[in-house]
């Protein structure tokens, strides 16, 4: 068996992630439940999210280099936003709908890994959105997501 590609390589390239998140956030801004949360997002928000997810999936480290981001920075974006489970579910639904519309790979293995990451990440976002201070140490490494499972419960 040859080298197994990263999720990033399997998905395509940076354009794949930029297209996905550009079209996704266009939907979010029109959504009755999510529009208020994102109406004041920075012009760079879409690019930063595309870079973040691409890096987590094994792509170039554009989020940590070009965007000067860290995992703690991303967590910090959610602090105090008071996101609800209903908002999380709508966000996931719209992202998966957009993934289908833009032709993101739909094979079971990739989609399982993609959905696994989106579920994990959005559930962390809801937890952190209830906090008033960022619990993450600034030196925490970026998450890395591959083809397998998360490895069991996270213990802080």
Image (tube, helix red, strand yellow):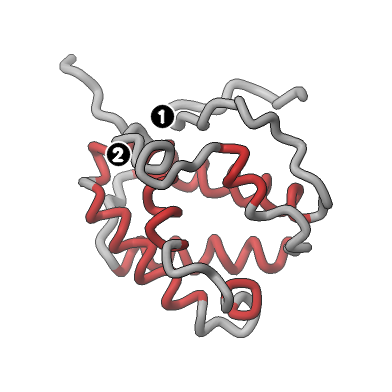
Rendered image: mark on residue 64: none
Quarter of the image for the C terminus: give it: top right
Rendered image: mark on residue 146: 1
Which residue is at 27% across, 65% downward?
102
Identify the residue at the far left of this view: 2
Q: Is residue 149 left or right of residue 124?
A: left
Which residue is at 29% across, 55% downward?
104
| CB contact under 8 Å: marks 1 and 2 | no
Q: Is residue 35 visible?
A: yes
- Within 10 Å of disc 1 (Cα), the crowding (few <14, some 14-19, many 20+) is some
Q: Is residue 73 left or right of residue 64?
A: right
Q: Secondary structure at mark 2?
A: helix
Q: Nearer the viewer, residue 46 or 100?
A: 46
The mark that comes first in sequence, 1 or 2, is 2
Q: Residue 68's image quarter?
A: top left
Give percent across and percent down for residue 19: 28, 63
Q: Reply above or below: 81 against 58.
A: below
Give percent across and percent down for residue 127: 76, 48
The residue that mark 2 highlights is 8
Q: Is residue 144 left or right of residue 105?
A: right
Q: Reply above or below: 68 against 129.
A: above
Which residue is at 41% across, 47% downward?
67
Give percent across and percent down for residue 47: 38, 58
């Amino acid at each position: 068996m040859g080298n197994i590609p990263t999720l990033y390589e399997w998905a395509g390239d940076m354009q794949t992630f930029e297209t996905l998140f550009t079209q996704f956030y266009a939907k979010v801004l029109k959504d009755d439940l999510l529009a208020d949360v994102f109406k004041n997002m920075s012009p760079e928000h879409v690019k930063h999210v595309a870079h973040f997810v691409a890096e987590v999936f094994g792509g170039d480290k554009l989020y940590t280099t070009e965007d000067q981001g860290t995992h703690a920075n991303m967590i910090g974006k959610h602090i105090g936003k008071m996101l609800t489970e209903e908002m999380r579910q709508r966000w996931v639904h719209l992202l998966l709908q957009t993934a289908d519309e833009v032709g993101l790979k739909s094979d079971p293995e990739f989609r399982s890994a993609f959905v696994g990451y989106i579920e994990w990440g959005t559930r962390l976002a809801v937890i952190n959105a209830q906090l008033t201070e960022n619990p993450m140490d600034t030196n925490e490494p970026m998450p890395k997501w591959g083809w397998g499972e998360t490895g069991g419960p996270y213990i802080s």
